[in-house]
Image (spheres, rainbow, N blue to C red):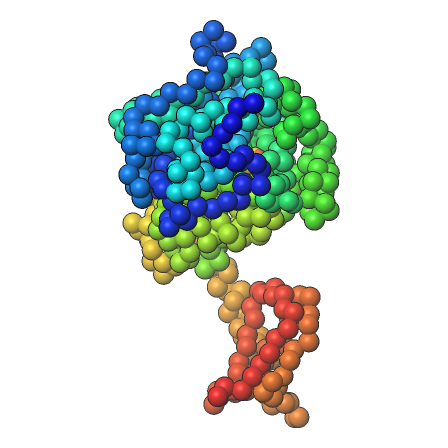
Amino acid sequence: MVEYPFEISPMFEGERIRKEGMFVELGGPKSLGLELVRAKPMDEIEDDKVTIVGPDLKDMEEGKTYPWAMIFNIGGELVETDLESVVERRVHDFINYCQGIMHLNQRYDVWMRVSKDTAKKMDSFEPFGKAVMMLFKTELPFIEKMQVTFYTKEEEVKKEMETAKEIFKARDARTKDLHDEDVEVFYGCTLCQSFAPTNVCVVSPDRVSLCGAINWFDGRAAAKVDPEGPQFEIAKGDLLDANTGEYTGVNEIAKKLSSNEFDKIKLHSFFQSPHTSCGCFEVVGFFIPEVDGIGWVNREYQGMAPNGIGFSTMAGQTGGGKQIVGFLGIGVNYFYSPKFIQADGGWNRVVWLPSMLKEKIAETIPAEIIDKIATEKDAEDIQSLKAFLQAKNHPVVTTWAAAEEEEEEEEEEEEEEEVAVTSAPGMMMPSAGFQMPAMASMPMAMPMMSAGKTGGIKITFKKAKISIERMVISEKK
Ligand code: SF4
């Protein structure tokens, strides 16, 4: 039996390597990181071979970041090109099974770290490569032969990156002429349930997976080669609503896989029963109520969105396999879908994108809206975003007038109520230490509390749905 210098087990999957414990960083936000799987004829693969192009682990300096690319070639009687993405998606799992080696993200934004402890136990990436290939061949027996090349030299990584981006583009383009209505089955994936137990991933021709790695063809190839595996067929069932993308078959699987937490998933809706978000989405969408529009921020963007929140904080709020109304995780390729959030206005509802993302997907943004979508160069906060959208006459601006009118009417009604409440005899304000009883959900019509203009408290809720278990109001010292 082959011995490896580190332990291998799924229990290391959640292991995080912080800066202090890190020997080297590979790829990530400060450099280039790539992973790619290619299907090759059997006679072109030297089984178990590891090639290292550039400095090996022993030649690396502690604490430094290096560019990184790993290209795996796979072969076998059942191996076909459609399986490349599915196999590639497992790179994340198998690398994370290796003690002291952390892997994040996928495709062209891979980020890895090797811990100091593990670097003490091996001076080359070779045993690491062999361990990962052993895991692949054990878990996915249709892979009969496999070899890997690790690149750590910048020019080589750049070259591989360019080629790989073309390959990813070609893979993503395969579903361009195929739509949800053209097929009888969609595909599901449960891989992310290991950390997001209620996540239900549904992949349809018009909706790529959140991680961006699995499209409808990939799901089909995976389900065919490994019917008991994590990717499986979902019978669409009856179409309930074409606009939101609601199907009886998808609802049934949502209920089953989420252990009854959700009973609906509408594939092309942002607000109503949206798709669950696991955590490995490439982009997160966020509703901006002040402008009635939706912004999107990608994983690579390091700055803040106009709501003052960055990707990682938003990802933390959105992930975990929940349906979070107001946030939505997606794969980049969903922007190319003709059904992109069509139930909520599609592109006409998009108000903000980081410039790097806008440039990347420019070809799919309708010509009439592209200049009306702000980036961080146009708007850094809500005020500047509002001014930009108004100046560009973005479609969301037309909804503001109606909303303002409604708000004014509500304010007038509230003022009338305020007069009635404050003049009511025997009206008592809550005393210090008052505890509001637990309530499941505060109704929108909750009466406003007021103590007049000379002090005390005034609480006004508008269009609010607030869940509170306990509220304590205490005296200001
Ligand atoms: S995001 Fe979805 S498709 Fe991608 S690995 Fe996770 S469960 Fe599978």
Q: Residue furthest top?
A: 43
Please report the residue visible at 58 percent of the width from the left and 48 percent of the height from the top: 320
Of 325 and 407, nearer the camera is 325
Among all residues in the image, which is located at the extreme left?
A: 155
Q: Which residue sits at x=65%, y=93%?
A: 425
**Image quadrant containing the N terminus:** top right
Q: Is residue 161 visible?
A: no
The quadrant holding residue 79 is top right
Give the x, y percent position of residue 312. 44, 50
The reply to whether residue 411 is visible in this rendering is yes
Residue 143's place in the image compared with 35, above or below, is: above
The one of 32 and 391 positioned closer to us in this rendering: 32
Left or right relative to 253: residue 141:
left
The picture quadrant for ligand 1 comes to top right
Q: Quadrant of residue 429?
A: bottom right
Number of numbered markers: 0
The image shows residue 325, relative to residue 413, as above or below, that is above
Residue 129, x across and y down, in percent: 45, 26
Which residue appears at 63% of the width and 65% of the height?
Answer: 467
Between 74 and 253, which is closer to the camera in this rendering?
74
Pinpoint residue 455: horizontal percent, then vertical percent. 48, 88
Residue furthest bottom as drawn: 425
Q: Residue at x 59, y 17 (%)?
A: 142
Q: Position of residue 350 (x, y in %)?
A: 44, 46
105 horizontally vs 424: left or right: left
Which residue is more in the foreground, 471 or 340? 471
